[in-house]
Amino acid sequence: MNIKVLYFARIKESVNYSTEDIVLPADVNTVVALKMLLAERGEVWADLFSGKQVVRAAINHELVDDMMALKDGDEVAFFPPVTGG
Amino acid sequence: MTVRVQTEDFDVGAELAAMRLASKDIGALVNFVGQVRDMNDGDVVSTLTLEHYPCMTERSLESIEVEAKSRWNIVDSLIIHRVGKLQPLDQIVLVAVTSAHRGEAFKACEFIMDYLKTRAPFWKKEATADGERWVEAKISDDDAQGRWANAIDKPVSDK
């Protein structure tokens, strides 16, 4: 399946991407599986996505937890805990 | 219910007057204004830059307003949140709630701010003499939101 991934704030600066399109392998169908896939890129990706840091996720503009399933065409966003207000 | 995310400043007096005069069944108007401080974690802050996630920001703020309206008998609510580069003394956020009586408006206003702090996708980056740094989320903000989790109309910690 094809998804769009967005990165924000500290995470965007660390990975040096704001957005990318990813074609997922068949066995990557949840947020946590996507995080593990990104962590395999090594370096800063491993630091961010292997579970050591708190990285929040949203699918199609809704906050979700790591077990949420992914669907073809989803917009997935990763960002640090929010600090507005 | 209104949500605005904008770079421009806002006129609190004009916004509150418009809300207050909207209906004769309004007996209370409660509001909160957040502004940029010149100190954070012991360092002087010269500028604060707010990033956000367009679309998700508006949707999350709207859903917080819907949740507040479902919990309390309020007439209307307004959230204005600024993004972009701000300086100390600049206004960041306005939350205002109208209701027939003050109790509902006080609670709904605090609830909206507590949820905004932990659910709306804004991120602050501050410039200090040592350079720029991202502001870290505070555990106390999660605690403030958590108070409302099991409460119909009041924080759990309110005995």
Image (tube, rainbow, N blue to C red):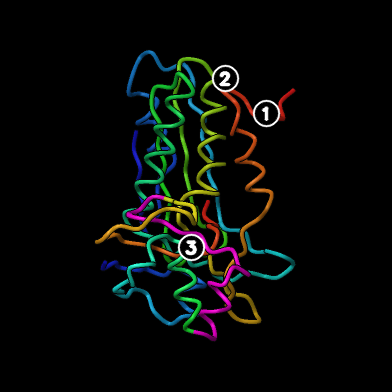
Q: Which residue is mark 1?
A: B156
Q: Answer left or right for B34 relative to A18.
A: right
Which quarter of the picture shows residue A24?
Answer: bottom left
Element under disc 2? helix
Give the Cα separation between the discs numbered 1 and 2: 16 Å
Say which amino acid is labelled 3: Val
The image's mark for residue B103 is: 2
The region drawn magenta spans A42-62
Q: Is residue A45 magenta?
A: yes
Which residue: 55% across, 79% down?
A: A46
Element under disc 1? loop
Q: Residue furthest bottom?
A: A43
User: Residue A73 at x, y = what percent?
Assistant: 24, 61
The image's mark for residue A32 is: 3
Name the chain under label 1. B
**Residues tagged 1 and 3 counted as in contact (Cβ below 8 A):** no
Q: Nearer the viewer, mark 1 or mark 2?
A: 1
Report crowding for label 2: few under 14, some 14 to 19, many 20 or more residues within 10 A (C-alpha): some
> Does mark 3 fall on the same chain as mark 1?
no
Give the Cα separation between the discs numbered 1 and 3: 32 Å
